[in-house]
Image (tube, rainbow, N blue to C red):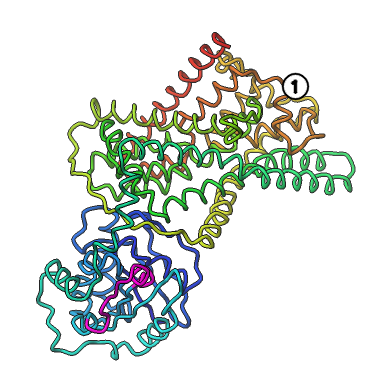
Amino acid sequence: MSSILVVGKPNSGKSLLFNRLTGVNQKVANFPGVTVEIKTASFRKHILIDFPGTYSLDPISKDEQIAVDQFVDYISNKRVKGVLCMLDSTRLERSLVFALQAQKFALEADVPVVFALNMMDEIARVGETVDVENLERDLGCKVYAISTRQRQGLEELSEALDTLATDPELFLPASTLDLDFDPVVRAHQLHAKYGANVDRLLRTQNRLDRFFLSGIMGGIAFVLIMLLLFQSIFTWAVPLMDGVEAGVSWLSQFTTSHLSDGVFKDFLVDAVFGGVGSFLVFVPQIMVLTFIIGLLEDSGYLARASVICHRALSAAGVSGMSFVPYLSGFACAIPAMFAARTIASPKRRLLTILTIPLMSCSARLPVYSLIVLVLIPPTKVLGGLLDMRGVVFFGLYMLGIVAALVVSAMLSKFAVKNEEDVPFILELPPYRLPSFKPLIERSINSAKAFVKKAGNVIFVVTVLVWVLGYFPNGAGNLESSYLGMLGRIIEPIFAPLDLDWRYGVAILASFVAREVFVGTLGTMFGIDGADENIAGLAANVQADGLSMASGMALLVFYVLALQCASTLAVMRKEVGNNRIPVYSFIGYSLLAYVGAVITFQLVTLFA
């Protein structure tokens, strides 16, 4: 099958076009370098290869270096029939710098290039035009005016790509085309002659930026938007969580009602529905978190948030470029560390990677949700606009952020002092209305990926916990089980938090993956006779009498602890040695334990 490369600068709509043409759900982001993987998908009888966005063939970050190296390899070795290069009509000059470099390199290797001039609907909306015909003439290659969001011109472009993959010679320019030019100078000339009026295009953006980037109002808007994000995790997800809980409970009763009493029935009730089922209840919150972050990305606000946060972040030794990896860390630390490749400064990149584990990832959500549901009543505040559970969630995430800044500042001053540094430079993408269908699909896929990734681990751990907790005396005898014996050994470690051995076992198990805490606790409460309320683990924990001091200590522990083997493995890969991940694991574990003990003492004192 013939292949075509899809390249372009970040924020040009390249990934959305890739989705439209192939039907593959790929992340569309409005921040440079979020897409760090090379994607391939079938297009008609051919293959499209979507490359990460890059500004130039002279890379300044690891992410761009990956894209450039792969681009050079594909072109030099004639591994593709042609190149589709995206141009942003609202940022034509910036798009053309990379486009001209890519065109020159490809044509010198006799690989044809076609251009897709995107976002023409926005040009028309402000009453501007782009002289496509003369731009095509001066470029010497076909230019197709499209609007990916409105699906305008996609059929004509699809036909052209079909022909390009089949008969690439038809798209090679005349041999007289002059390729001896400076891309920056040439891009400026082409935009001046054929591009739209930049002032008119930026009028709305500048008006919004005067508000969102202002010192006081911009800061207030940022806090309110972040508060809305964390409030929505509870508010929007509650109906879905209730539905999942009811479904798990019904499925459990339906399945076990046809079985006779015995080991197999106890296994299904306690391990499968009590452990894994308790974890599944909290998956809708991951979908909501992914959806809200996607809204911020696709609207263009995410880059503004980076600018707003730059002063505070730079005081901690990092920069506004660290904001997106940090925010990505709310979903998962692994892609967040990959996103840190876009930080050109080696020093700030290292500090960002080291502090990303303090961002509360989606694996912590089930733990937070369980304890918050147990401890915090759904009291309305601010006239019913918010409830206390959402406010507590906001506080937990802010605690992780503040801890990351403090740790970063200390590492910057005492440990990471001699690394190379570069200035903070960031392109602000235009404000755009998000496309909701890709956002919803992305949210669903994130939930599926999380369940697929965590489900196997949780199942293995809950089965192990069930076996150790069930034998030798069967259900209802947890204290005299093998697990009970193990729990008694480690109980003194958690005595300063007033947590019994069951919580100690769940905490130790969660060092494999944080979300295992909920499944393990659900299994143990099931074995201990709580099977009449299988999915309602929060009700079981509440009835068991978890105190406010112990619960808050648990929350602080999980905010600060580094409990993910995959995160440590990726950290090792990104920093290039074993020493840093080991020190990070030990350091964050001690920090979490000490923080939990202090929290317990403070809450006990003031409560």
Q: Nearer the viewer, residue 516 or 331?
A: 331
Q: Is residue 106 visible?
A: yes
Quarter that holds the C terminus: top right
The part of the image, by quadrant, that contains residue 170 is bottom left
Q: Is residue 404 above or below residue 240?
A: above
Asked which secondary structure carries label 1, the reply is: helix
Residue at 40%, 65% (x, y): give it. 15
The part of the image, by quadrant, that contains residue 73 is bottom left
* Residue that badge 1 annotates: 480
Image position of 85 (left or right of 368): left
Q: Nearer the viewer, residue 220 or 113?
A: 220
Residue 331 percent location from the top left of the image = 48, 45
Figure disc tally: 1
Residue 436 percent location from the top left of the image = 52, 60
Q: Nearer the viewer, residue 343 or 310?
A: 310
The part of the image, by quadrant, that contains residue 421 is top left
Most extreme residue toward the top is 605
Residue at 28%, 28% (x, y): give it. 409
Residue 107 percent location from the top left of the image = 21, 80
**What amino acid does circle 1 point to?**
Ser
Quarter that holds the N terminus: bottom left
Image position of 269 (left or right of 79): right
Characterize the local packing of mark 1: few (<14), some (14-19) or many (20 or more) Cα atoms within 10 angstroms.
some
Q: Is residue 172 above or below residue 505?
A: below
Q: Is residue 575 visible?
A: no
In the rendered structure, does residue 331 fall within the stretch colored magenta?
no
Residue 472 percent location from the top left of the image = 77, 28
| Magenta stretch, residue numbers | 118-134
